[in-house]
Image: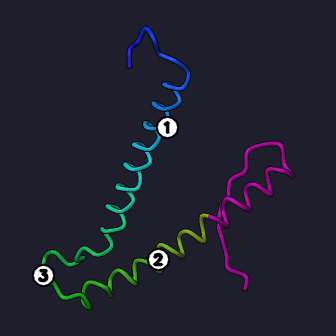
Amino acid sequence: MDINNFQFSDGITMSIFAMLVVFLILVLLQMIIYSFKFLPQDLNGKNKAAASAPVAASALQDHDEEERMVAMLTASALAKEEYQGNVKIKSIKRIG
């Protein structure tokens, strides 16, 4: 390919080749990330059952905290439609 005789078809060929390279790299990255699932999770040699119990308890607390945050954001958004000023949520109670 000579830069002085560069034609439209040469540009199309180069663009297609460049897109193929990018997609091949993306597929390679996807396979690498997917392979992380098969790596061992317990690298320290600790017992899996002992490690999973605190995770389950903290997961419940995180889920509860997430529900509270969603409730606060929803309540403040609905109150903001009614009132013109700033809205401050003081407490949250579970009804049902």
Q: Position of residue 87 (x, y in %)?
A: 73, 50
Along the viewing direction, whichever of 94 and 31 lies nearer the viewer: 31
Which residue is at 75% across, 54% downward?
A: 77
Sequence-first tag of 2 and 3 = 3
Q: Is disc 3 placed on a helix, strand or loop?
A: loop
User: Label 2: few (<14), some or many (≥20) within 10 Å?
Assistant: few
User: Label 3: few (<14), some or many (≥20) within 10 Å?
Assistant: few
Which residue is at 44% across, 48% downward?
A: 23
Name the amino acid, label 2.
Gln
User: Label 1: few (<14), some or many (≥20) within 10 Å?
Assistant: few
Q: Is disc 1 placed on a helix, strand or loop?
A: helix
Indicate left or right for 40 with 20 as reference: left
Q: Is residue 48 above or below residue 70?
A: below
Name the front one of labels 3 and 1. 1
Residue that carries the numbered disc 1 in the rendered image: 16
Decide whether residue 86 is among the magenta residues: yes
Q: Position of residue 68 (x, y in %)?
A: 60, 69
Scheme of image coloration: rainbow
Task: Find the distance from the CA under tag 1 to the CA under tag 2.
Answer: 50 Å
Along the viewing direction, whichever of 32 and 40 lies nearer the viewer: 32
Residue that carries the numbered disc 2 in the rendered image: 61
Q: Position of residue 59 (x, y in %)?
A: 43, 78
Indicate left or right for 27 with 46 as reference: right
Sequence-first tag of 3 and 1 = 1
